Image (cartoon, rainbow, N blue to C red):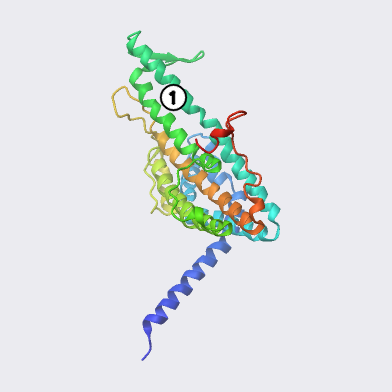
Amino acid sequence: MQDDSGISIFAAIGAGLWWLVQNIAGAFYNLGYALSHTESWLGWLSWENSLEDKQSLMRFVYYGGSVDFFFVAFTAFLVLTVVGLYYRNVLWAVVRGLEGFANAIGRFFAWAGLLMVVQQIIIVFMQRIFARPDMSFGLGIALEKDISWYAEELKFYNAMVVCLCVTYTFVQGGHVRVDLIYAGISFRAKKVIDMIGALVFMMPVAVLVWMYGWFFLWRHLIVPNPSASDSLDRLVLKARALRWNVETAGFSPNGFNGYFLFKILLVAFAATVFLHAIAFFYRSYLEFVEGEESEDKYLDKDGLGAGEEAYEGAH
């Protein structure tokens, strides 16, 4: 008797592999087409409220969360990995570039923490000492808002630190770890675990956050609301009725009303985590191949300064 279940399993696996090969091969065409027809999806940047601008924006929204875009990024990662297997200096250059990017972004937006503290102190003084209901800041063009607006804005500074400094903290080794077996295993076993972690946890989670966050963002910027289930043709058809509808609702009548900025931070968070997952995977692979002498090679790690060596690793 023929085992139909076994045949169906192999058929499903074969169909899945063929789908994967098709999408990887199609990524080269899609990338070439996108780069040679930038006006079809970036023309909206010179916004003139024309139908062409609206259609261009809808294409941008569609491609940003599409399978096509994912496979362009995935194929680029595969090609770079294959090249790096033969030319390790290429991978080291990618690691240094992506870690440098993470450090630069993190070191810049970490100042939002200081800004948050200073603004909170000003709010306390204005409320308790000067009994003012509002504040005005600005050079030439004043930003005059109720104190509750500035108080709720502190959440945005905190979100900037969390979303844009996460990869910087990863590079610096500042995240808290719960270590059950990692410290007691060999150096190369650690690198294998790091590679698996980058591929199985960091990358998929970053992709999921991006997919949900991308359309979540645009649903708070434009109408008609785009959906992840909409086809490209349907979104282009919706473009005729497109208009900007930036979210300005706050949690209180005079509170902070720029909550669409949090959606942008969510997308930025997913993008930076995905990029650093690539850097972490490559660093782990290179350290696995080259041995313990390559540990922390080219790593730009901050210190506490001269005379503070005793506190290193305790912060």
Question: Residue 117 falls in which quadrant of the image?
Answer: top left
- Residue 258 position, x and y percent, is 39, 29
Q: Looking at the image, can residue 90 be seen?
A: yes
Given the image, on which type of amino acid does mark 1 rest? Met
Residue placed most toward the observer, 163 or 222: 163
Could you tell me which residue is drawn at 41 percent across and 30 percent down? 156
Left or right position of 107 against 245: right
Question: Please, is residue 256 above or below residue 224 in the view?
Answer: above
**For numbered disc 1, what is the local secondary structure?**
helix
Residue placed most toward the observer, 33 or 237: 33
Left or right position of 299 against 110: right
The residue pinned by badge 1 equals 116
Question: Please, is residue 85 above or below residue 206 in the view?
Answer: below
Q: Residues within 10 Å of mark 1 (few under 14, many from 20)?
A: some
Could you tell me which residue is drawn at 64 percent across and 59 percent down? 289
Could you tell me which residue is drawn at 36 percent across and 30 percent down? 248
Quadrant where the N terminus is found in the figure: bottom left
- Residue 17 position, x and y percent, is 50, 70
- Residue 177 position, x and y percent, is 45, 47
Question: Residue 126 falls in which quadrant of the image?
Answer: top left
Give the residue furthest to the top: 130
- Residue 47 position, x and y percent, is 51, 34
